[in-house]
Amino acid sequence: MTQGDDPSFAEKLGHLFEHSRDENGAPYTGKKIAERANNLGYSLSDAYISQLRTGKARTPSFRTVEAIARAFEVSVTYFLANPDEDLERVRQQRDYVEMLATTGTHLSGIDVQSICPDTIDVVIALLKMVKAQALESKEAPPGADSGQSPA
């Protein structure tokens, strides 16, 4: 495995070649995948697929990844370097949108990418708490929080 135990593109591609079968039950070849991709409107050669499989070529374009994914009939997300990171990013974006809706605030002018994810979670939780307290104080009878008894 590669860094962080995430399989490389070549390893993921190799896995598809090992475990996928064509309509006749035969394993795919690079030539067959290139033909399928080209029939779908992409421009892909067997030689380039071979370079990707061996790791000699390591940075395919999105269009190439899309061509290979469609030829194998899998989602392009199969080739994501780290789907857990992407899922975490989506979760943070969802939480941020929820925070906006809950608090009516936003973090304009802040480079959110430079903030640690744990810090963003704490800020969101804090803003939700502040909003909840503000709503509670609006609903509470006058003087209820001040320790004074109502006159």
Image (cartoon, rainbow, N blue to C red):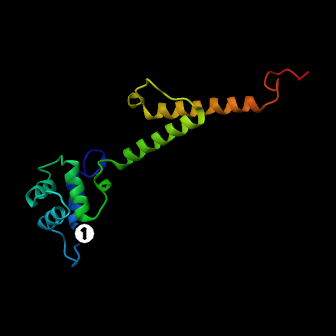
Report whether 75 appears left or right of 131: left
Circle 1 residues within 10 Å: few <14, some 14–19, many ≥20: some
Report whether 80 appears left or right of 139: left
User: Considering the image in quadrants, where does the C terminus appear?
Assistant: top right
- Viewer-proximal residue, 122 or 89? 89
Report whether 4 appears left or right of 44: right
- Residue type at mark 1? Ser
- Residue 96 point in image, percent of width and height: 50, 37
Q: Quadrant of residue 124?
A: top right
- Residue 84 point in image, percent of width and height: 38, 48
State the SS at label 1.
Answer: loop
> Residue farthest to the right?
151
Task: Count the marks.
Answer: 1
Residue at image location 68% in from the left, 29% down from the top:
134
- Viewer-proximal residue, 15 or 97? 97
- Residue 73 point in image, percent of width and height: 28, 65
Residue at image location 10% in from the left, 58% down from the top:
45
Q: Which residue is mark 1?
A: 20
Residue at image location 18% in from the left, 46% down from the top:
59
- Residue 103 point in image, percent of width and height: 59, 32
